[in-house]
Image (tube, rainbow, N blue to C red):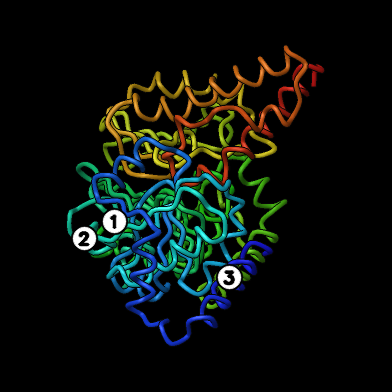
């Protein structure tokens, strides 16, 4: 806040001294003499090679929504011009952080970049080509809502014959994405449809059902919950109202029983009107290790392979199709989150059983489908192994929690939610491994 006030005082005092000369053109000319521009190729290289970078869009949220989103990087912020000076302090950026500022027509971004320089940031660039040049070049764009006509963030896409998935946003829950920040998948068989994940809320579940009806006349026979988290289960009563049984692992059911009321209250607070008709339910059928769904001539296996991201994480395996819906057992486009009850050592052991399935196509809980195990192994198992190795070195050297915060995770900095989760993951793994050494 002090830095923001200082910048405002500097700006206002300058305006008072030369009020007659403070025109839009003069302001842009002044910015052009003090701010360094970066071209499209330079911005692409910065995003790919420097994990410390921050990209700031100074347009309004309405503009972002109406024009197709923002430039996609692992850390893109929306701070409208006029609020930039006050909001930048929240990000706790180092003065030498590489910052790129852009808008639509190179009118607001040069003065915004100059303001950041006046606030003491020393590595600030203006991207004059702006969002439209980036978007029209087919470069990566983050979209707040890909399907504005639906509560779904994106409409279902065909993965392989009979297998579809509505790929959720890989960012946290927002009002715009309606809580659709995980994948809502379904399998069409000759004997009906199996849905994986009930959805974050009643209306989101209805939107998914509406899309399923456009694709097939087969009725939904079962809904399987990948775990007991809110975005997997809070929409279950929509399906139950239509006579569809909901299936979950016993540990997921226990999570819903213990934490469901709090998750519902949080949903109602953040989603407001979009939480309409959402109420807490409980699964109709639970299982411990394996549950086979006989769907005509096909058997779909619902499997608990062992500890993973959260209690009751399961996978849905279709051996005849060689397709697995992995839920939160596997991650790749967004950083995996560690919870207080995540068993990271157990998750690594679970991975071997997951890989032994021999899937050719994997639909993870977040992000698009992938072929084979290489990508999800790199960003799930290998990440867990690396972090545990680094924490063990700290413990062996007599280090503490502050040392865990400093673990180099730059190889994963391009993943969505990296900045929200990286330091938190390090701290939780450190605390868990401290207890492991004590025999707990």
Q: In the rendered view, tell whether residue 127 sits above or below residue 276.
A: above
Q: Which residue is mark 2?
A: 133
Label 3: which secondary element: helix
Kindly give the residue lying farthest to the bottom in the view shown: 20
Location of the N terminus (image quadrant): bottom right
Q: Which mark is residue 156?
A: 1
The residue depicted at 40 percent of the width and 59 percent of the height is 34
Q: Which residue is mark 3?
A: 10
Q: Which mark is residue 60?
A: none
Label 1: which secondary element: loop
Residue 178 in percent (x, y) is at: 46, 66
Q: Is residue 3 left or right of residue 143?
A: right
Q: Earlier in the sequence, mark 1 or mark 3?
A: 3
Residue 133 in percent (x, y) is at: 21, 60
Q: Earlier in the sequence, mark 1 or mark 2?
A: 2
The residue depicted at 49 percent of the width and 68 percent of the height is 175
Q: In the rendered view, tell whether residue 131 sits above or below residue 50.
A: below
């Amino acid at each position: 806040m002090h830095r923001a006030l200082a910048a405002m005082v500097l700006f206002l005092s300058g305006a008072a001294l030369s009020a007659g000369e403070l025109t839009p053109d003069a302001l842009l000319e002044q910015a052009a003499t003090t701010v360094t521009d970066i071209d499209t190729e330079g911005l692409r290289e910065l995003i790919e090679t420097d994990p410390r970078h921050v990209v700031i869009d100074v347009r309004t949220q309405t503009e972002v929504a109406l024009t197709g989103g923002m430039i996609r990087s692992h850390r893109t912020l929306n701070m409208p011009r006029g609020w930039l000076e006050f909001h930048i302090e929240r990000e706790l950026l180092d003065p030498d952080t590489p910052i790129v500022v852009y808008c639509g027509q190179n009118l607001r971004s040069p003065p915004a970049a100059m303001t950041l320089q006046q606030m003491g940031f020393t590595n600030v660039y203006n991207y004059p080509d702006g969002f439209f040049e980036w978007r029209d070049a087919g470069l990566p764009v983050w979209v707040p809502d890909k399907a504005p006509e639906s509560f779904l963030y994106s409409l279902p896409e065909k993965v392989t014959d009979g297998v579809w998935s509505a790929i959720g946003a890989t960012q946290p829950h927002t009002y715009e994405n309606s809580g659709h920040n995980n994948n809502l998948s379904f399998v069409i068989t000759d004997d009906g449809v199996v849905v994986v994940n009930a959805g974050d809320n009643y209306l989101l579940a209805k939107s998914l059902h509406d899309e399923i009806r456009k694709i097939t006349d087969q009725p939904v026979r079962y809904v399987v919950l990948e775990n007991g988290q809110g975005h997997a289960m809070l929409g279950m009563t929509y399906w139950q109202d239509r006579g569809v049984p909901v299936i979950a692992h016993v540990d997921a059911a226990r999570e819903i029983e213990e934490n469901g009321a709090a998750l519902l209250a949080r949903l109602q607070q953040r989603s407001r009107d979009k939480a309409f008709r959402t109420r807490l339910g409980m699964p109709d059928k639970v299982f411990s290790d394996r549950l086979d769904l006989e769907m005509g001539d096909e058997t779909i296996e619902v499997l608990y392979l062992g500890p993973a991201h959260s209690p009751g994480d399961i996978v849905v395996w279709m051996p005849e199709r060689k397709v697995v819906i992995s839920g939160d057992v596997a991650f790749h486009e967004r950083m995996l989150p560690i919870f207080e009850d995540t068993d990271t050592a157990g998750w690594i052991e679970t991975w071997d059983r997951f890989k032994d399935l021999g899937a050719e196509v994997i639909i993870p809980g977040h992000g698009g489908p992938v072929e084979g195990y290489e990508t999800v192994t790199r960003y799930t198992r290998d990440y867990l192994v690396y972090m545990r190795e680094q924490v063990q070195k700290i413990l062996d050297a007599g280090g503490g929690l502050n040392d865990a915060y400093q673990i180099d995770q730059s190889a994963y900095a391009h993943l969505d939610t990296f900045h929200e989760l990286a330091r938190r993951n390090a701290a939780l793994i450190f605390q868990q491994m401290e207890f492991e050494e004590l025999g707990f």
